Image (spheres, rainbow, N blue to C red):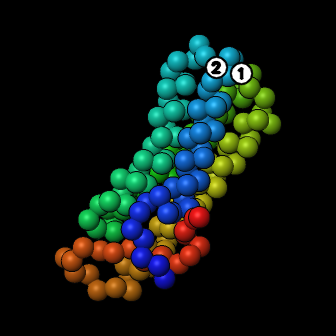
Amino acid sequence: MAKIERYEDLKCWQQSRLLVNQVYELVSESSLRKEFALIDQLKRASISVMTNIAEGFNRYHKKDFIRFLDYSQSSAQEVKSLLYIVVDQGMIEATRIKEIQSNCDHCQAMILSLINHINGTLRNSNQTNEPEILYVSDEYLGQ
């Protein structure tokens, strides 16, 4: 088990960063340029996936981290849902959107897996008021 010192080392954060970049690339399309509210919400929701991982990671207690990871995984599904509007309104082809929606599901799965892992470590450790250090197996670490 490796001690995690930076949220940037977490695979779920790295994947969420990719999601943000996919969303920003998508909203630069000319067919979406006039959809100001939709663009804003897509950007904010995708940013929320990434930033909640970072913010939660830097909390004092693991339970706080889990709460922020929960916000993050639900924001991934918000992005996916908003992308249905893009398809339903004929703004962009469904085949292009499906790749981003798939990444939303992938981000959510990775985050939920990390939540389950942290919950397991909480059950197996004694609960003290000491700062909690996060140790994870290599499957949660990216390169």
Where does the image place residue 57, in percent across and percent down from the top left?
Answer: 37, 61
Counting residues from the start of the chain, the first of labels 1 and 2 encountered is 2
Disc marking residue 32: 2
Where does the image place residue 110, in percent across and percent down from the top left?
Answer: 58, 62
Are the residues flagged by discs 1 and 2 in contact, CB closer than 8 Å? yes
Where does the image place residue 18, in percent across and percent down from the top left?
Answer: 60, 46
**Along the line of sight, the residue nearer the viewer: 74 or 40:** 40
Q: Residues within 10 Å of mark 2 (few under 14, many from 20)?
A: some
Question: CA–CA distance between discs 1 and 2?
Answer: 7 Å
> Looking at the image, which residue is at 61% across and 26% down?
27
**In this rendering, would 86 be left or right of 76?**
right
**In this rendering, would 91 be left or right of 133?**
right
Disc 2 residue type? Leu
Q: Secondary structure at mark 2?
A: helix
User: In the picture, residue 29 is in which quadrant?
Assistant: top right
User: In the picture, residue 21 is in which quadrant?
Assistant: top right
The tally of labels here is 2
Visible residue check, residue 85 = no
Where does the image place residue 86, in percent across and percent down from the top left?
Answer: 67, 27
Q: Secondary structure at mark 1?
A: loop
Q: Which residue is mark 1?
A: 91
**Along the line of sight, the residue nearer the viewer: 134 or 82:** 134
> Looking at the image, which residue is at 59% across and 64% down?
143
Where 32 sits versus 99, above or below? above
**In this rendering, would 116 be left or right of 82?**
left
**Along the line of sight, the residue nearer the viewer: 104 or 74:** 104
User: In the picture, residue 92 is in which quadrant?
Assistant: top right
Disc 1 residue type? Met
Q: Report the residue that reaches farthest toward the left.
A: 129
Q: Nearer the viewer, mark 1 or mark 2?
A: 2
Visible residue check, residue 5 = yes
Where 100 sits versus 71, above or below? above
